[in-house]
Amino acid sequence: MIPYTVKDAQGVVNTFQDIAQRVVAISSQDVYRARDIIWQRETGIIDPTPLTENSPLRSQLYPYLGLSDDPFAQDYDKIPVERVLRSATELPATIIRLPMVYGAGDYQHRLYPYLKRMEDNRPAIVLEEKLARWQGCYGYVENVAYAIALAVNDERAKGLIYNVAEPPGSTEGDLVKAIAHIVGWQGKVVILPKTQMPDTWKFKANLDQHWVTNSTPIRTELGYTEIVDRHEALKRTVAWEREHPPEAVSEKGHSKLLDYKDEDTILANLKS
């Protein structure tokens, strides 16, 4: 379930190659080059989406090297993990590439910054134009678990790689509106071009690159479909986030969003 490093993967191979028929390993869609295009580690290209299992992978390994004191972060990379597992001829591997997983247990609290603004009765949420139109790859935790179970229990998955994600088409702006509908927030989503965002807004990313994947193979070959629809998934996630808020929350939430002071200034200027 958690092969973060080459050492993890090699340990699985060494331990199980003589006693197991195959391994199902959990990878990530951060293996794709699109991830580095977004974070501007790759420039001058945009990869077409939705990404398939054969889309280009990152050329630069260890994406968090030097960015954290956590030793796991230094050695983390799913690309070499996949290579180790797929090269183990005595232990055929199925690789499941996961999206951004939300729902109960999401330690990153991906939806909480939007929810908190709504719980604080903010009159509006200001989104930069390209962010509002950006498409990311998401999956609800129970649906993702179902996909993994299918791969474990179906021999047809042997030796294959599968993307798991909700169907593409929903934007970040759509996500905010869907959460607002669930919680009954009556505020507005205000979309502005980057030129109208304040200098204090520090989010730096190439949002011309979307990060959505094609999950058709696992649907057609293994019969995967979402067992919890998106509305219900978001509803359950909102309930969990309310019961398990993160310990430390700034009003900014994360670098995609403005702090409340800057947001208030923008809203006041729009009214004047």
Image (cartoon, grey):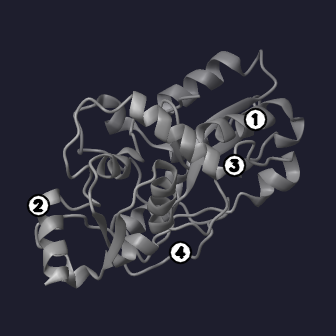
Numbered circle sitting on residue 261: 2
Mark 4 lies on a secondary structure that is loop
Numbered circle sitting on residue 47: 4
**Screen quadrant of the C terminus:** bottom left
Residue at horizontal 37%, vertical 69%? 189
Residue 123, horizontal then vertical, whole percent:
27, 62
C-alpha gap between disc 2 and disc 1: 58 Å
Query: Which residue is the site of mark 3?
Result: 229
C-alpha gap between disc 4 and disc 1: 32 Å
- Taking depth in this image into account, of 138 and 231 the one nearest to the observer is 231
Whether residue 106 is visible: no
Q: Of the residues shown, which amino acid type is indicated by label 2?
A: Lys
Q: Earlier in the sequence, mark 2 or mark 1?
A: 1
Mark 2 lies on a secondary structure that is helix
Q: Of the residues shown, which amino acid type is indicated by label 3?
A: Asp
Residue 171 as seen in the image, left or right of residue 89: left
Residue 213, horizontal then vertical, whole percent:
62, 62
**Screen quadrant of the N terminus:** top right
- Taking depth in this image into account, of 192 and 219 the one nearest to the observer is 192
Number of numbered discs on residues: 4
C-alpha gap between disc 1 and disc 3: 38 Å
C-alpha gap between disc 2 and disc 4: 36 Å
Q: In which quarter of the image is residue 206?
A: bottom left
Q: Which of marks 2 and 4 is nearer the N terminus?
A: 4
C-alpha gap between disc 3 and disc 4: 29 Å
Q: Which of marks 3 and 4 is nearer the N terminus?
A: 4
- Taking depth in this image into account, of 258 and 177 the one nearest to the observer is 177
Numbered circle sitting on residue 89: 1
Q: Of the residues shown, which amino acid type is indicated by label 4?
A: Asp
Q: Which of marks 1 and 3 is nearer the N terminus?
A: 1
Looking at the rendered image, the disc whose residue lies closer to the viewer, 4 or 1, is 4
